[in-house]
Amino acid sequence: MKSPIKLTKKKGRLNLFFMEMIIVLLFFSIASAVILCSFAGSDKLAKDSRLLESAVFRAQSAAEIYSQNGSLSKTAGMLFPSYTAADGELSRITVPVDGKMYMIMSETSEECGGGILKKLSIIFRNNDGETVYETETGAYISERAVTEFE
């Protein structure tokens, strides 16, 4: 007499096992694709964050220097030692920063209450031309200080 175990088809059980393994592998491959996409996205966010942090730090330094001396060319010279000022006073300067973005500083001034109110606009743009960070600061130079500088 033949054993009942030998009468069942082994191929049917193996096919179900392999089908289950294929479904499990499909699930893990989809999960790993989602995880890799999230890691790539977080890497891009980290790079953008470092770029923004650098821009904010440089803008803060420029604002502090400008509020002390009120001169755009002196501010650029102190921030970027390799910068050489052109003849005369400039009202706009564009300086590359770290090869990833550039800094645009533009200055306006107006008479105000016996002195001069100078405003400095600072804009950081990446190499694609998108604005990364933008701020504005000012320096008030009193009438007495204006005559002392002349």
Image: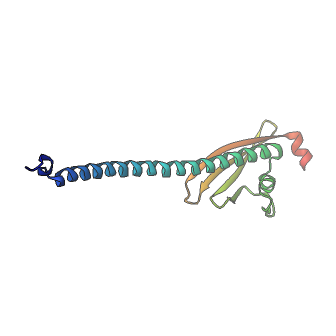
The type of colouring in the image is rainbow
Q: Nearer the viewer, residue 10 or 60?
A: 10
Residue 62 picture location, percent across and down: 75, 48
Q: Residue at x 59, y 47 (%)?
A: 49
Q: Residue at x 81, y 60 (%)?
A: 88
Residue 70 picture location, percent across and down: 80, 47
> What residue occupies the far top of the structure in this picture?
113
Q: Quadrant of residue 102?
A: bottom right
Residue 14 picture location, percent across and down: 22, 53
Q: Nearer the viewer, residue 137 or 9?
A: 9
Q: Nearer the viewer, residue 31 or 150?
A: 31
> What residue occupies the far left of the structure in this picture?
1
Figure label count: 0
Q: Nearer the viewer, residue 87 or 42?
A: 42
Q: Position of 81 compared to 134: left or right?
A: right
> What residue occupies the far front of the structure in this picture?
1
Q: Residue at x 71, y 50 (%)?
A: 107
